[in-house]
Image: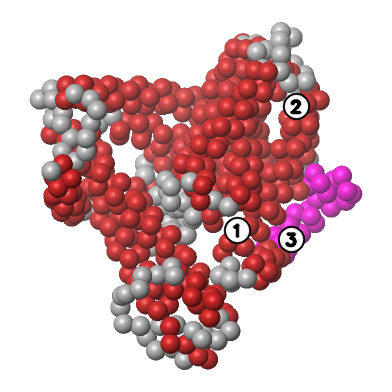
Amino acid sequence: MLWPSILGFGIIAVYVVWIMDYFCTIRRTPSYLLVALFCAVYIPFSIILLVPIDLASSTSDNRPLLELPREVTFATWRVLYWLAFFLTWLILPLLQSYLESGHNDNSKKIRDALRANARYQLITLAVGMIGLLYFYLYAGLSLTSLKALIIALSHSYSLILSIWFMGIGVVQIPRALFLKSSPARILASLERRAPILHDHLEESQTQFKEVTTEIRSLIPVKNGPYNDWIDSLLDEVPKTGGAPRTLTRSQVTEEYLSSLSYRLRKSKIALARYEHEWNSLIQNAADIIDIVDADGSWRLRFKFRKSTLSPRLAYFQNNFLRPGFYKIGGIVTSCFSVILIWSEFAQGTRASILGFISISTFGFIQELLSFAVIAYMCIAAYSSLANVKVFNIYVLARKHTDARSAIFYASQACRLTIPLSFSYVSMVPRKAAASVFEEFLQPSINLTPLGKYFVIWLPRFILVPVLFSYFKLYDRVQRVFGFEQEFGDDDELVGSRAEGRDLINYELINMRSEFQLERT
């Protein structure tokens, strides 16, 4: 029956829409961007079902619960691969450059996007010529071999990223769950994070004020060819503020206004994001303080928000039920992480745990196992990717993710589709016919001796990000290179607990006054 598979892919589509709305708010996102983002996010999540269906269909004579005809599976892999290829190398980069352009005219935005991506493609082509030369000396050159070379090169780059992100995720997920099982540890983490986040907030407020002041300086010189453009900028800033500086009409050029528009958009995004993150941190800290203070009293009353539960039920939920759930989750994910790390390291040997289990299972049981493992691999890789803040330019934030950041993360997640699929398929040897995925892509990936040995030994590389993450070596590396406030996850960048506690208490005093006024 095909309907269980169709239903499964439909559920994934609904989940993808929820993720997009969680980060971007669909109502405020242009429709042309929604289509590209949906495809870019749906493709990497679709392998959670597609890989188990493909493997179960090729390893058992018994009909599994979820199945697709082999020709449909083959067509699906081809569509996913080439759609991901064009999205990550052409469509999404063009959209990103289009959105980054500060011009007020659509045609000029398109021109900027084409020019920026032409430079990018030329740089990529120049680097790819090295691989092309090696390939020509080894296997000759033809249209078929050139296509295979492109697949092998793009796979190698993405495979490194997938192994790295997955290695971080398999450590961070259990650690985060164990952290959430202890309210006292959560409060300590929030207090350490508060000074850094507060500094970011003040910096974003200063930058926004400087840009708005500069825009108000355009009022005396706005009459001219750029009158409408300047009016649109003035509509986006407060009417009052700091003293505007003096500008001459000759300074107001198209390039100047384009740069100013870009800086305004960037400062507004940063300000909204840090205001949201700061408010969320204060609200979370307020709840955790109430939970910690109620320990042993068997009654929990939240001082800064209303609760639908009675004090006894609220105490049981927040001091027993929720911590217990997180502890169980931490234990389960720790077991998954150990199995996954060992199976990656022992790939191709009899010591592989996933390899042994895969050979011993068939049909629906094998599908269920594949679904659980590859879903955890995807969660580990995608969650690590989502937590990376690239020089504070691209950041995922709930309901406050700008379009540029959404495109960047969707593009990177899309690049991980084939490598994650290949990593799992390589970990589960089978005494059966090759899967459709292996028939379609593996010959190209293993096209040269370099590619063959590369994919055999690279999975052992997972130990590097695992050790870096487990021993928190990222902090030391970031301090050495001076990236404390520019690169990485803010949760790993900590300040003084005493300073953070003072900042939180100051905000809570204001919240208490506002909350009491609302209740009266």
Ranked by sequence position, the earlier of labels 3 and 2 is 2
C-alpha span from label 1 to label 2: 32 Å
Give me the C-alpha separation between circle 3 and circle 2: 32 Å
Q: Is residue 133 magenta?
A: yes
Task: Return the mark for residue 73.
Answer: 2
Indicate the secondary structure of the residue bearing disc 3.
helix
Q: What span is colored magenta in the figure?
A: 120-149
Position of the N terminus by quadrant: top right
Name the kind of residue labelled 3 in the image.
Answer: Leu
Relative height, residue 268 to residue 223 (above, below): above
Residue 250 is marked as none
- The three-letter amino acid code for the residue at tag 1 is Gln
Q: Quadrant of residue 354?
A: top right
441 part of magenta stretch: no
Q: Main secondary structure of the magenta part?
A: helix
Q: Residue furthest left?
A: 297
